[in-house]
Image (cartoon, helix red, strand yellow):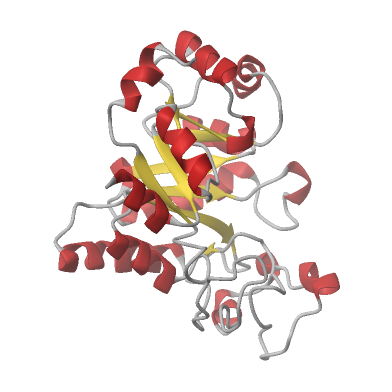
Amino acid sequence: MPNNSFLQEAARRPEVHGHRGCRGLLPENTLPAFLHALELGVDVLELDVVVSADQQVVVSHEPWLAARLGRGPAGERIDPRREQEYNLYHLPYAAIRQCVVGEWPHPEFAGQQPHASYRPLLREVLRTVEAASQRLVRSPVGYSIELKSTPTGDGVFHPAPAQFVELVLAEVQAAAVQARTTLLSFDARILQAARHQDSTQRLCLLNEAPVPVTRLFEELGFVPDVFGPDYRLLSPLLLQELSAGYPALRLVPWTINELPDLQTALQWGVSGVTTDYPDRLLKLLQ
């Protein structure tokens, strides 16, 4: 069974990370989803960012217009076979802003309530959420911002890592939320660029492959502040390895939605849980 730092962590309340706001409840990565998650009481908002043709940091999981989420710039339905042709890195934000998302039910989330919206800029999300936190008289929320990047996507779907990180850090710093922000990525190059540009920035390495943690960190070149594995990779053996070798490391698995899995994560004493249903997790914690 897990021991040491993770058993100590179990005595504390883990952070509730609202995945893409609260994707199980409202359309992902939209202002309505972020604001609803804030009202529910999440500790951290998890979101994804890409870059537009005019170098704006846009909140979106895919660097293209996903057909399942909404329409194209002219209000047209998007053919799923051609969605990557709607490359956000080749579109100015003014065109992206016109693309409606969330007006019909999500095929994977039967309980998600349709709510017509749009892909906001990162700066708009930060400004809106900060103002809402003050109105709600609640503690400031944290931000987990995933930079969507791959080596084959450089110059095609996004800028190279150094420029990508520079654009995102500029927005975070301008909003004065850097101390509450963690940058996430599956792409080690993003975290390496972030560490080079600002050694104080909190970083999280995401992982979805059964690769030894020691190898992941060796390839990264340093131990990140947070490790974010696919929750299906968790096991007592992995927890023991992390506790023994990296006692200061925070563990925030993703994306845990079902009650038995949420209960198991809480028993194992993770630092936080990323979930599409923060309402379920918050109810458990009560």
- Percent of width and height locating residue 19: 48, 54
Pinpoint residue 160: horizontal percent, then vertical percent: 65, 46
Q: Residue at x 61, y 19 (%)?
A: 213
Total label count?
0
Q: Image quarter for residue 161?
A: top right
Q: Is residue 235 visible?
A: yes
Position of residue 37 measured from the top left corner of the image (x, y, whole percent): 36, 62
Residue reaching furthest to the right: 81
Q: Nearer the viewer, residue 188 or 118?
A: 118
Q: Residue at x 60, y 59 (%)?
A: 61
The answer to which image quadrant residue 267 occupies is top left
Seen as rendered, the residue at the extreme front is 260
Q: Is residue 100 left or right of residue 166?
A: right
* Of the pair 97 and 67, the residue shown nearer to us: 67
Q: Is residue 68 left or right of residue 4?
A: right
Residue 203 visible (yes or no): no
285 relative to 208 in the view: left or right: left
Taking the spot 38% from the left edge, 11% from the top edge, the residue there is 4
- Work out whether 263 lies above or below 237: below
Residue 19 horizontal side relative to residue 7, left or right:
right
Specify the farthest residue to the left: 137
Asked if residue 160 is positioned above or below residue 252 in the image, the reply reads below
Which residue is painted at 50% across and 20% down in the image? 223
Residue 53 spot, x, y in % from top left: 63, 68
